[in-house]
Structures are given as structure tokens and as C-alpha cells.
Amino acid sequence: MSIGYWSTLDTAIGPFTAVVAGDGAVLASGWTGEVGELTPLISPSLLPGEVKHRRDLGPVTTAIREYHAGELDAVDEIEVRQRSGEFRERAWDVLRTVPAGKPVSYAGYAELAGNPAAVRAAASACARNAAALFVPCHRVVRTGGALGNFRWGVNAKRWLLDHETPRA
């Protein structure tokens, strides 16, 4: 039976919980203090048989702290593991290349993911993303700049985008 681990940290926008595989790859994460909100988001093929609390998840915990403290690229090299269809997995990989401070529209995201006509599928990839922050779905906005939806709330999305906006 595989074992995963979870930890919750306090951040400027509330508790942030991450669930990792035994090797440390992020399986799910988001702004919640309830691990039970995250485990259903993990693909059944990746879900550990048991998920245990651990105060510190090593590089993942460090990256979460550093990102919220202003080191915006701290999460970039953390391994993430998600499973779904081919388009969605590609879209998640592409999303990790969208730089902080440079949000894209859903249409632009669909184009980056290789199918400009797949705007709804791109939006669905954002909605089904289990690894918030590490796969930065908050960086996708509506055409014209409106925020759009976010699993962890529009206020959290606004904070994240403001946090990533370069200061003059």
C-alpha cells in the first residue's frame, strides 16, 4: 500500500494544504485547512492507500513559504503528478510555463495548449486542476481581464494575481 503525506501551512490568504506522494511529488494542493477537500481531487490511479499528516513536506513546504513571501518562482521546480486525458495533461504542463505576473486569457491558454478552438476544454483543465499554486490555474483570466472562477475563491485569485504583479 502506498503512503502519501499532507501538511497545512498558514498563509496571507488562509490555510494552504498540500498532499504529496511518498516520493514528494505534489498530488493535490489548495487554500484549505481540510485535507478531505483535496483527496477527492486526486486521480484514483495516483491516490495513496493512506495519507498521513507530516508537519513538514521538505521542499514542498519550503516552496509554499517562499512563494507566499514573494519568491514567485519557488514553486516552479516542484514535481507535480496528475492524471487525466491527453489534452488536460498537456494543458496542465503548459500552464506551468505561464510566468508569474503575465496572466493569459482562456483563449490564449487553449492556444498555448495546442488547440485554439478548445477554449472550454482549457477552462475545464483549470477547473479540474488538483495542484493549485504548483499548476498556476489562477493565471488564467477571462478575455478582457475579468478574473473568472477559481476553486479557492475569487478573493484568493485576486490576491495571487496582485501578489504576482510587478511593482513599478
Image (spheres, helix red, strand yellow):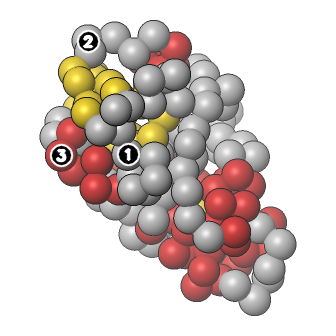
Q: Name the residue under label 3.
A: 36
* Tag 2 near tag 1, CB within 8 Å: no
Q: How far apart are marks 3 and 1 (CA)?
A: 12 Å
> In the rendered view, would you say 153 is above or below 19?
below
Residue 97 in view here: yes
Q: In which quarter of the image is the N terminus?
A: top left
- Identity, as a three-letter code, of the amino acid under mark 2: Arg
- Identity, as a three-letter code, of the amino acid under mark 1: Leu
- Identity, as a three-letter code, of the amino acid under mark 3: Gly
Q: Distance between the residues labelled 2 and 1?
A: 20 Å
Occupied quadrant, residue 17: top left
Q: Where is residue 80 in the image (x, y as percent from the top left)?
A: 57, 38
- Sequence-wise, the earlier of marks 2 and 3 is 3
Judging depth in this view, the residue of 50 and 147 nearest the camera is 50
Q: Mark 2 points at which residue?
A: 55
Q: Distance between the residues labelled 2 and 3?
A: 17 Å
Q: Is mark 2 on a helix, strand or loop?
A: loop
Relative side of 154 to 89, left or right: left
Relative side of 141 to 100, left or right: left
Q: Name the residue under label 1.
A: 47
Judging depth in this view, the residue of 146 and 22 nearest the camera is 22
